[in-house]
Image (tube, grey):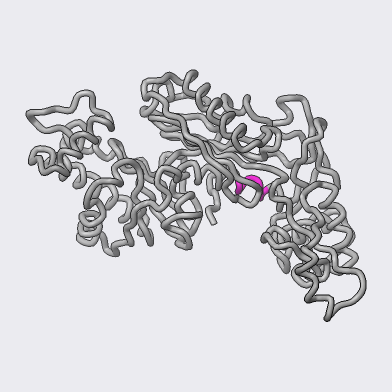
Amino acid sequence: MSCRNARGRAHPPDTIRLSPGTQVREGGELAQLTGGDSSLLRRINSAVTLHALRGGDALTLTQLVGDTGLSRPTVEGVIEGLIESELVVEVHPDPDSRRGDSIRQRGRPARHFRFRAEAGHLLGIEIGTHGARVALADLTGRIMGSYARPIDESTGATERLGLVRATVAELLRRCEVSRDTLWAVGVGTPGVVDAEGVVRLGTALPGWTGLELGARLRRSFRCPVLVENDANLAAIGEHWKGAAAGMGDVVFVLAGLSPGAGSLINGRLHRGFGGAAGEIGSLHLLGRESNPAQLLSAPSKPIDPLDEAAVARVLRLAEQGDQVALDVRDRFLTRLVRDVAALVLAIDPEIVVIGGWAAGLDGVLDPLREQLTRMCLRPPVVRLSALGDDVIATGALRLALEHAEEQLFSVDQEAVRTSPAAGAAGATSTTPEAPKVSRHISAR
């Protein structure tokens, strides 16, 4: 089963995202994943075998037969196809490790096979107000490296995107990874992002509202580029590798001048109808007393310009005991608690994770816990982000990994289809067409 396109680049095979023992519907009938000779079942068998191998350990044919429930001849045929597609490779165990087995087994040693996580790579990109951060992973999601570049907040859209591309190029150079091996790119950005990767509203960055961010970035890659709101990706990242791991109902708050939030319900991202769910920073529109400029400025000492650096200076003064600065900090925390409480009352999450630059405020968790206990019917667990500055890029990686898994473990009934990335260059491949941004991204 060859998965190379016209340029000779490896692509994911046409398989189905299933675990051993799962049932699939074919022609109105349910078929157990225990073999079969149709084209669909061959792809299913490949997916089940690949799923078993992707756990990380090298397995023998006998172990694969036991793990998948497939017959030995079927597994042998599937393995040959996966080796041809460069997703699986035969490995030779250390002779010392086989020495103990020689007492129990004679004859030709068993063949071992492993999933080639290095067959492709994934990229996670954060485009922030003050910089860009990029993370690289293999096809299992193992993070191989990251790189960050500061960017002045006044930088325009075109120049900022150029700096983002340069950040990507530097990380790929450092990790000695070819751009052609990328299977998917996830991108996190401030603002309301629609399913096509267009920033419908983005006031944090100059020239960002209306920017066709997905289309602009796709010019730099021969793979799908998936764009999502930064707070949403932070929630996904924290659920994947951080403080919310193992929890289904999650709220992540990016605490800053205008806080935003991402939420998972039953482990799935909730974007809302138009992608604007979680924009709690707009709650100040309900009353002038909650305007960020008023909250974060003392009457006699207005903060001008009102930016994160200036606010950080005021907060440092609060840590030193300055009474005016302490009043400013208390107003900020009061506003943050009110914003978070509104979301907690609506969603009833198991956990609220606080991230963003304001997460470093002294005592932010205690007043949050206290006020949420007072305001909410069932106060959630409240924790600081475990991923810190890497949380958005990590979530973007998870978004890209979700797409790669869709390609590895999903069936495309059409034999050949032009993917968006390849189609732009006039190439065709057997890769199923990449979806745009999923409205419900699983964050398992």
Q: Magenta includes 416? A: no
Q: Where's residue 344, x and y in %?
A: 32, 55
* In-image side of 393 versus 8 (left or right): left
Magenta-highlighted residues: 401-406
Q: Is residue 86 above or below residue 433?
A: below
- Prevailing SS of the magenta stretch: helix
Q: Where's residue 384, x and y in %?
A: 34, 53
- Front position in the image: 363 or 158: 363
Which residue appears at 57% of the width and 37% of the height?
226
Residue 272 shows in the view: no
- Front position in the image: 23 or 320: 320
Q: Is residue 260 above or below residue 293?
A: below
* In-image side of 246 versus 422 (left or right): left
Q: Quadrant of residue 179?
A: top right
Q: Where's residue 272, x and y in %?
A: 45, 44
Q: Is residue 385 above or below residue 327?
A: below
Name the residue furthest bottom. 104
* In-image side of 30 versus 286 (left or right): right
Q: Where's residue 302, x and y in %?
A: 14, 27
Which residue appears at 80% of the width and 53% of the height?
89
Q: Looking at the figure, which quarter contains the C terminus?
A: bottom right
Residue 110 shows in the view: yes
